[in-house]
Amino acid sequence: DGSLRSTTLAMSFPDTSSDGSAASRMRFESAGFQDIEWDRLTFGTRLYNFSCYAHCADDLYLLDRFLCLSELPDIDGDSVKLLLRTLKFMRLCDYTVEDICSALAHASS
């Protein structure tokens, strides 16, 4: 059911900006990424390596839930980077969290 998936996605993340530049590593702490319990995320190791591409810490939680709902056994770094950049694009285009979650829920089924 799409509404259940959307609800699961919406509830999965506990806003702050970052990009792929060297300056983003300096913002890592101020963006709240240091508070993320990476080992509790199913894809935490993968996401940590590409967290500099996340727009905010919430996107890391959201992407982890999306990947779990998609039932992927693993994901390569280029795909993580692309998905994080897509989430950033949607946020910068002022998509609501509900719209982002809805799009991801449909994509995961």
Image (spheres, rainbow, N blue to C red):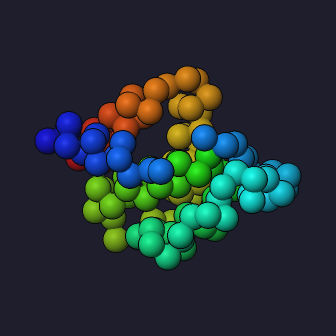
Q: Is residue 98 above or below residue 8?
A: above
Res 70 quadrant in image: bottom left
Q: In this image, 60 relative to 72: left or right?
A: right
Residue 37 in the image: x percent, y percent? 53, 70
Residue 54 in the image: x percent, y percent? 62, 49
Q: Nearer the viewer, residue 87 or 27?
A: 27
Residue 91 in the image: x percent, y percent? 56, 32
Residue farthest toward the top in the current orientation of the protein = 94
The answer to whether residue 75 of the structure is visible from this angle is yes
Residue at position x 38%, y 52% from top? 12
Residue farthest toward the bottom in the current orientation of the protein = 39
Residue at position x 49%, y 25% from top? 95
Residue farthest toward the left in the current orientation of the protein = 1
Q: In this image, 5 relative to 31: left or right?
A: left
Residue 40 in the image: x percent, y percent? 45, 72
Locate the N terminus and report the quarter of the image it occupies. top left
Q: Is residue 86 above or below residue 52?
A: above
Residue at position x 20%, y 37% from top? 3
Q: In this image, 51 relative to 29: left or right?
A: left
Res 32 quadrant in image: bottom right
